[in-house]
């Protein structure tokens, strides 16, 4: 049976001489693996170049509730990303976020709110012409809401510490080594108030932006089993510095 759904490319892996297995986060079925035969051939109907990280898709797919590798009938890049593949900063941000999403999003069931957040966030980044230095930070903070471990904002404006392990602001220094202290706590509280539209108003130094990202990734690692290290982080930091 054929189904129409939107999708977001998470990872494409070469398979055999000419085929590709691609993991796509779909609106209708969650994260699914699809095999595309002949994708590496010059005149392929669905070419390897259509499967770039975080490419946005319109799909017609075959679907079986077996958890096995599925097949695609039709695939279109819709909307086509106009700036992310060609802008050095945006492409590095996309590669970084792609690695985070690949490690963080595992469910093979539909989650339309999570899907819509990721899809619209990629579209927003692609359309934005300036002021994207804080985008990855805001994206990760808001993504945690959909993944189920958004920080508790109670007392956010009235404390000196943020307990990373327990995800809450506190007046007292936590017993663990994973926490934020002034002025980082206040910057993190301000980050929680940001949206894509107003994030340019948050003024952070490059060093502070790096520190906040380091602590955000630490926060993710504590709440997602097997999250590990994000390899593309170093490249992103270099580009944004």
Image (spheres, helix red, strand yellow):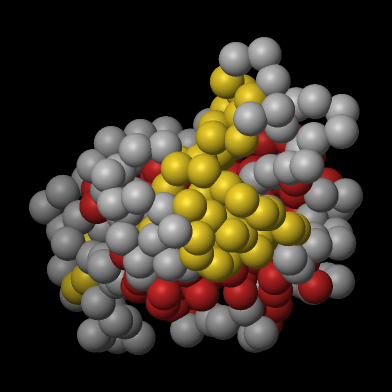
Asked if residue 209 can be seen in this view, the reply is no
Say which residue appears at 52% left-offset and 49% top-offset. Answer: 24
| Image coords of residue 230 (percent x, y) | 48, 37
Q: Is residue 120 visible?
A: yes
Q: Total number of numbered labels?
A: 0
Q: Quadrant where the N terminus lies?
A: bottom left
Q: Residue furthest left?
A: 175
Q: Which image quarter: residue 194?
A: bottom right
Q: Nearer the viewer, residue 214 or 203?
A: 214
State the residue at coordinates (54%, 35%).
35
- Among the 4 quarters of the image, the one containing residue 158: bottom left
Query: Looking at the picture, how far across and down is residue 33, in whole percent?
Result: 45, 41
Residue 164 image position (x, y, % from top left): 26, 58
Query: Image point 31% across, 60% down: which residue?
Result: 109
Extreme residue in the front direction: 1
Considering every residue shown, the one lying at the far top of the view is 17
235 left or right of 194 in image: right
Work out whether 166 lies above or below 223.
below
Above or below 162: residue 42: above
Residue 138 position by quadrant: bottom right
Work out whether residue 221 or residue 40 is closer to the camera in this orientation and state it.
40
Relative vertical location of residue 131 with respect to residue 22 in this rendering, above or below: below
| In the displayed structure image, the side of residue 61 where residue 220 appears, left or right | left
Seen at 61% across and 35% down, the residue is 36
Residue 169, percent from left and from top: 24, 73
Nearer to us in this view, 173 or 29: 29
């Amino acid at each position: 049976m054929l189904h129409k759904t939107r999708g977001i490319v998470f990872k494409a892996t070469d398979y055999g001489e000419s085929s590709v297995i691609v993991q796509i986060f779909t609106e209708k079925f969650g994260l699914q693996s699809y095999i595309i035969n002949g994708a590496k051939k010059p005149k392929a109907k669905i070419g390897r170049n259509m499967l770039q990280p975080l490419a946005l898709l319109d799909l017609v797919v075959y679907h079986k509730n077996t958890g096995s590798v599925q097949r695609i009938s039709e695939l279109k890049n819709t909307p086509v990303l106009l700036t992310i593949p060609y802008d050095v900063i945006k492409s590095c941000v996309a590669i970084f976020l792609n690695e985070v999403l690949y490690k963080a999003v595992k469910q093979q069931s539909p989650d339309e709110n999570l899907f819509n957040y990721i899809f619209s966030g990629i579209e927003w980044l692609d359309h934005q012409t300036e002021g994207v230095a804080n985008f990855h930070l805001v994206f990760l903070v808001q993504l945690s809401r959909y993944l189920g471990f958004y920080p508790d904002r109670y007392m956010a404006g009235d404390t000196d510490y943020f307990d990373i392990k327990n995800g809450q602001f506190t007046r007292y220094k936590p017993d663990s080594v994973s926490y934020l202290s002034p002025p980082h706590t206040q910057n993190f509280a301000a980050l929680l108030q940001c949206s894509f539209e107003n994030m340019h108003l948050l003024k952070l130094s490059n060093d502070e932006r790096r520190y906040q990202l380091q602590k955000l990734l630490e926060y993710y690692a504590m709440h997602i089993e097997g999250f590990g290290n994000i390899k593309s982080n170093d490249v992103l930091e270099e580009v944004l510095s």
